[in-house]
Amino acid sequence: MTVVSEPATRAGSGWQLARAAWAVAAVFALSNSPTPLYVYWQQELGYSSGTLTVVFAAYIAGLVMTLLVAGRASDRYGRKRVVVPGIVIALISAALFMTAGSVVTLIVARFSVGVAVGIVVSAGMAAVVDLGGTNRRHLTSMLASIAMVFGSGLGPLLGGLVYELTPEPVGWVFTVNIALLVVALIGYVGLPLERPAGRARGPVWPRLPRVPSRNRKHISSGAAVFAPGLTATSFVLSLGPSLLVLAVGNTSPLLAGGAACVMFLAATGSQLVLTRLAVPRLFALGSSSTVLAMVAVVATLHTESPVVFVAAALLSGCGQGLGQLGGLRLIAQHVDDDRRAEGNAALNISAYLPAAVLTVVTGYAVSGWGIQPAVTTLAVALAALGLILGTAAYRANAAD
């Protein structure tokens, strides 16, 4: 086996960093643009809340399967060779959403966008940190994290606004998404992203991401806070429209999309405001936000208040954003350049798997038990898990 030594990616300009970050934002915008449209599709195609969570879980399945390969492929062959095909897959997914006339097409589209997200969340976010160079890792880890949550918030807001403004929302929403992705693709082609030095060539087979033993504490600590936070936001995204209809009596896609947008704006804002905090404090605040978010979800069922639901979305966003920022910062500071994308993949697979499982379980529990007992039971379970894991992550990093 031949080891090829090539120069590491050179530090990029601010404009190049923005182009790399925009690719992450554009793909995540597509991933959440369908959120407010599920009410429309549910009426047109007649599927249940349980089926809705299966559609959402198809996204998680595509993402997790991709994370088994994308991080190591990026570390071995270079960021650009992995991210550019990911953007192309996102374009195909947008076209599928635009023409979806069945639940099967929706599932295929969601699976495809999950593949694209799996690529950018590992390789794309690592590229942002690479372009920043050694001296800017604190800044670029925050930029990568913010690009993800900004795109996640832009998507549902776009979907909700277009739904209200036009009688044919699906075509317009995904036309705009295609335009955003084309801009991202054009911007990515000229980035100075080299293949990391010292990596052997050869096929990359699917397997769980691995990191050096010295970095396992960093990955597990980030996942301990990021996973409950991501599960909370997935909870709100997948069941938000149903929760608004069943508990609040509101069917407005703009409210569903606006709540999702507010959730990710909270994730963005919390990272910007609190970026100077040490990682243990980020973990403490992130875990606390997730616990309070689940309290607000249960309160929504009893108060039937859209305001309380929006509060749950805000707190969920803070929980995900701060956990994600802390985890990415640990990876940027402690994981070697040629293992960074695989470290990102390990962090995200640890977070997205429990999010997928709990979201599907919740959807079918709502169908079988009714919304109040199902949502209350699972919200309490998630709050308890978030508290326990958050405390462990805080203690593991408090001495550093």
Image (spheres, rainbow, N blue to C red):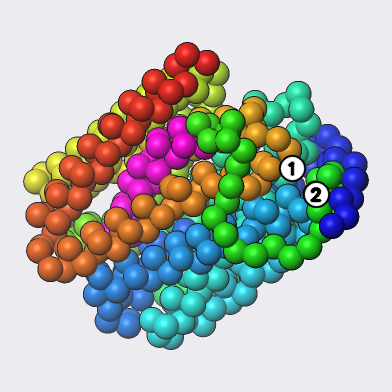
Label tally: 2
Q: Secondary structure at mark 2?
A: strand
Asked if the residue under mark 1 is in contact with the one under mark 2, i.e. CB atoms within 8 Å, the reply is yes
Residue indicated by mark 2: 199
Q: Amino acid at mark 1?
A: Asp
Quadrant housing residue 389: top left
Q: At label 2, which amino acid type do we have?
A: Arg
Q: Which residue is mark 1?
A: 338
The residue positioned 14% from the left and 41% from the top of the image is 299
User: For the point 72% across and 26% down, which residue is it?
Assistant: 136
Can residue 101 be seen in the rendering of this structure?
yes
Residue occupying the point 46% across, 65% down:
61
The reply to whether the magenta stretch includes residue 143 is no
Q: Nearer the viewer, residue 261 or 270?
A: 270
Q: Determine the secondary structure under disc 1.
A: helix
Position of 77 relative to 326 (above/below): below
Where is residue 82? Give x, y as percent.
Answer: 72, 60
Quadrant of residue 263 in the image? top left
* C-alpha separation, residue under disc 2 versus residue under disc 1: 7 Å
Q: Which residues are magenta?
A: 219-239
Q: Nearer the viewer, residue 70 or 288?
A: 70
| Position of 295 relative to 79 (above/below) | above
Quarter holding the N terminus? bottom right
Q: Is residue 84 above or below residue 276?
A: below
